[in-house]
Amino acid sequence: MKLQFTWCGCLLAFLLSGGASVARATIDDHNPGLIRVLSAIDVVPTPAQLAEVTGKHPERELYAVALDASLREYLRSRATSLLSMYPNSTSAFYLEELAEIVHLRSLRWMAVYTRIRAFADEAAIKFAQSALASPATRTRHAVIRALRWVPGAAASNVLTAQLERETDTRLRKTILRMLRLRQ
Amino acid sequence: MRLLGSLILFCVISCSSDGSRGRLNVSDVSSGTALDAADGADSSTGVDGGDQTDVVDGSDGADSGDAATSLDSVDTADAADGGVASDSLDGPSAPSGIVVEDLGTIQATGGTSGTLSFTTPENAVSFSITVEGEDGVFYAVDNLRGPDGVVLAPGSWPTNIANQGGHIVCLICDNRLSSGESAHGVLVPNSPNVSMLPGTWTFSVMSFTVSAGGSAFGAPTVELTDSSYDVRVSFLEPESDAIPSEGVLGLNLWFTGSNGLSAESAQTDERLQAAVLRFIETYASAGITVSPVRYFDLDIGIDTVDSLSGAGNDFEALASATAGADAGVNLIFVEEIVDGSSPLSGFGLILGIAGGIPGPTLGQGTGRSAVLIRTADVPEGAGLEIPANLGNTMAHEAGHYLGLFHSSEQALFGPQLHDPIPDTAENDNQNLMHFNNLGNIISEQQGAVIRSNPWVAPEGE
C-alpha cells in the first residue's frame, strides 16, 4: 500500500503541477483497486471498504481521480462525492479547489455539494454563502440541496435569505422543500 | 397511491374480520388511469395534477380521493368456502397467464404478521409476493416455506448474525431476497435451484425500522415495529406449464427536467433514443419485447435525489408520483443520485437505483415503484454514460427491478458474492448485472427469471 501511495502522490504532484496539459494521465496511472470501486454503478462503498483498496491517504487518491480529465466523468464525480467519507481539512481543501477549477458542470455541482453536506460546519456555511453568489443556477442548486443536511439555525437562515433574493422559480421551489424537510 | 387506496378499499370490502381473500386479475391492478403520452399530446396528464402539490409539500403523495376506477367495481369476494375466496375477476382486456391473489391488510404487532398462506395452482411456474406498507418501515418476507416443507427464507433473517447481507439481502435464503422500505417484493423462484411446487406455501412478514450503528464500522440497529400493510401474491400461470420463452414488458419513462429532457424532447433526443434502443435490444436478447414505451413529464420540483430512505425521501416522492401509470417498469430520469442512505458515514454518487430486487409487482405509485437513472448534463466526449452506458444502466437497474441480483459483486472483505444463478459466469463484466455494468449480456437463466416476473406479460398466452 505504501508503494501505491507514493506512486499516487507522484501522480497528484504531476496533475497539480500542470503537467496534465502536456502529457495526460491515463486510467492506468491510478490505483486499480480504487478505480474498480469507483466503477460500480449502484453501490456506495463504506469507509472500511475504501480503506481496503486505498493507501494511507485515500483523500489524495480520490482527488487525483477527480482531477484527471482523461477519466470518465462518472469516476471523477463519484470520487469527489466519496471525499465525504473523510471530512478533514485536506478533503475540504480539495473540494474547494475542485469547485473552483473544474469545468464540468456536474463535477462542480458535486464538489460544492460535498463540501457543504459532508462537513456541515461553520466553514461550510461560509462556503455556502459564497457559492450562493454564483450566477450559475446549478451551483446555487448544489448549495441549496446540501444545506438540507446541515443542522442548526445558521443553515436555515441562509436558505431563508436565499429565498428572498432567488429569482429562479425552480430553485425557489427547491428552497421551500428543503426548508420543509429540515423541520 | 391511487392503487394503494384502491387495494385498501378492496380489502375493506372483501377482507373483513373473517379474513376472506379476493383474487383479481392483473388488468384490474395495473390499468386504470392511462397516462400514455407516446403521442406527445398529453405528456403531463395525471402528473401535474393533484398529486403534485402533495409531493412537493413533503407528504407521501397520496391521492386518497381518486381511487382507480377499475377496482371500484370489483365485486366482493365469496367467502362461502370458509374464508378463502378465490373469485376470478378477469376483465376483457386482461392478459391471461397472470393472476393476483389479495391476502388483505395486515395489522402486525411486534414486527411480525404471523403465518400467512396461499395455494399455488398446478400450472403456476412462479409467484411474487408484494408488500405495500408505511413510510420509514422496512419489510421482509421470512419463514417462507414450500409445500414440501423446505424453508426458502428462514425466520428473522434480517436480524440473523449469520446473514452477511445484514437486514438488506438474505444470503442465507435458498431463494435470495432483499428487504424493502415502504414496499417490498419477492420473486420465487429466482434461480433454477429453487423448485416451484404446487400446493400451500406459508410465510410471514417482518416489519422493522433501521437506525445508524454506533461507529463507522458498526452494524445498524434493527428494531421490530408494529405496522399496517397490504399483501398480495401474483402467480404466473402459462398454458404451457413452463416459464414462457417470450414476453412483453411495458416501459414508462419519466422526465424531471434533468439534462434538459422532457417527455417531448426525449422522443427525438438522439442520445436518449440510442439508450432506449440499447434497452430494447438488451431485453430482446432474452425474448422480451419492450412495448409500449411511454413518455411522461414528472414535474414535482425534484430533479436531484439525495435521500433514498426515511421520512420525505426523494425516491419515495418521485416513485409515488407514478400512481395510475399503465403497467410497466417506471424509469425516472434525474440529474444526480446521491446515496447517503447507509447508516455509516459519508455518501456517494451512483448512476441508478431500483426500487427493489424485485420491485413491487403489478402496482404503481408505491414509494418503491420506480427505478431512478442519472442523466447529468455532461457534454459528449467527456466519457458520459450516453448512449451505450446509459442504455446499459437503464437495463441493469430494470433487471434489479425485475428480480436479478448482481451477477458478481465487488470483492471487498471476505469471499466475493455472486448471484444464485448457475449460468452467469463469475466476474464476467459483460454480463448485464455485473456490478460495473460494462455489458448487456443476459444469460439464459437470467432471462427466465425476468420472464417469471409478473411485469413481463407472457406473450401468446
Image (cartoon, coloured by chain):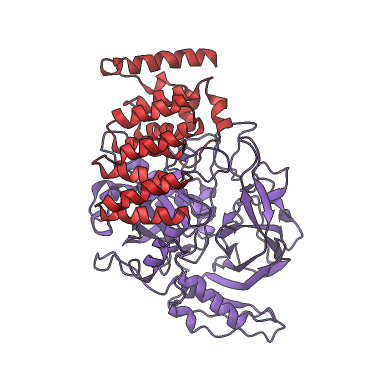
Task: Choose top left, top right, bottom left or bottom right for residue B254.
Answer: bottom left
Residue at 30% across / 14% down in the picture?
A19
State the image coordinates of residue A36 (x, y, percent, origin top left): 48, 30
Q: In the image shown, does B32 or A125 lie closer to the viewer?
A: A125
Q: In the image shown, does A147 or B340 lie closer to the viewer?
A: A147
Q: Colour of chain B?
A: purple
State the image coordinates of residue A30 (x, y, percent, origin top left): 43, 21
Regarding residue B374, the answer to whether it shows in the image is no
The answer to whether B329 appears left or right of B76 in the picture is left
The answer to whether B202 appears left or right of B326 in the picture is right
User: Is A69 placed above or below B26 here?
Assistant: above
Residue at 51% across / 39% down in the picture?
A44
Task: Choose top left, top right, bottom left or bottom right for residue B320.
Answer: bottom left
Q: Chain A is drawn in which colour?
A: red
User: Is B2 placed above or below B161 here?
Assistant: below
Residue at 51% across / 60% down in the picture?
B244
State the image coordinates of residue B219 (x, y, percent, origin top left): 66, 41
Regarding residue B195, the answer to whether it shows in the image is yes
Task: Choose top left, top right, bottom left or bottom right for residue B290.
Answer: bottom left
Residue at 54% across / 79% down in the picture?
B9
As drawn, the residue found furthest toward the right would be B149
